Image: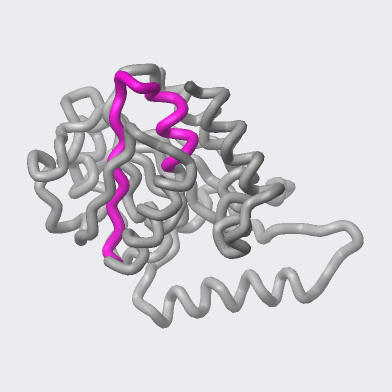
Amino acid sequence: MAEAIAERVRRYILDGSDEDLRRLLGVAESTREMARSAFRRVGMQEGWHAIDCGCGPVGGLAVMAEMVGPAGRVVGVDFSEPTIQRARSVVAALGLGNVELFAGDIHELDAAAVGGPFDLAYARLFLMHQPDQVRTLSHIARLLRPGGWVVAQEALRNPPPRSHPHLDALGAYWTLVYDLLERAGGVPAPSPRASQPGSRSTIWHVIFVPRRAAATSGCQCRSSST
């Protein structure tokens, strides 16, 4: 099943008739291996039940469906009903039979109503939009079984992305993104290494949070940057 899903994604990127879907799948494909590596680190396997928080029209649904296999189950949740409708068309186009989708606010979601508790919750570029990230993590953690995992992929404000040759516009764009987030009420989490001399440039920060820690306000996170 895993290879079949990956092949359908690649085929649609090359030959699909829906240009917007091809673009979305291309973005998802560019972060596929990073997500897969993160899932492997927490022991994700066939038969797991997983939830993608703020899944958008694609999110991590394809790679999660691939990794949990036909015996597992993936739930995608997004606040926007039109986005969930779009996600349903994506799931149908890719033939992801082990994926279900729900429209709702993650802060008000009842685990039992969407088939929880889950073994793993995933969020990509989601926490950076939340005004109270600890509160959001706590609500996500309540969707999990004891010992379950939260895996979050988030873009760091510092250090900013780099390019070769150097482009001033890239740094200006990154600053603009975070300025807009702050004005919209999001409070980006600073990189713990941002002020350290010689820290390497990174866009993604992957946070692994055990359920028992995420459910408390003083949670301890294990993280890695790429």
Rendered image quadrant of residue 152: top left
Furthest toward the bottom, the residue is 183
Left or right of 186? Residue 148 is left
- Tell me where residue 192 appears, x and y as whole percent: 51, 48
Closest to the observer, 223 or 116: 116
- Tell me where residue 110 appears, x and y as whole percent: 10, 47
**Chosen colour scheme:** one colour
At x 61% / y 32%, what residue is drawn? 7
Vertical order, 12 against 46 (above or below): below
At x 66% / y 74%, what residue is drawn? 173
At x 57% / y 50%, what residue is drawn? 25
- Residue 69 located within the stretch drawn in magenta: yes
Rendered image quadrant of residue 19: bottom right
- Residue 82 located within the stretch drawn in magenta: no
Closest to the observer, 205 or 14: 14
Residue 71 visible in this rendered orientation of the protein: yes
Furthest toward the right, the residue is 165
Rendered image quadrant of residue 71: top left
Left or right of 26? Residue 41 is left
At x 40% / y 61%, what residue is drawn? 86
Look at the image and tell me in which quarter the C terminus lies. top right
Vertical order, 214 against 3 (above or below): below
Vertical order, 210 against 78 (above or below): above
- Tell me where residue 125 appears, x and y as whole percent: 46, 56
- Tell me where residue 122 appears, x and y as whole percent: 37, 41
Residue 202 visible in this rendered orientation of the protein: no
Please give the range of residues in magenta: 61-80
Please count the marks in the image: 0
Left or right of 59? Residue 3 is right
Vertical order, 81 against 127 (above or below): below
Closest to the observer, 96 or 167: 96
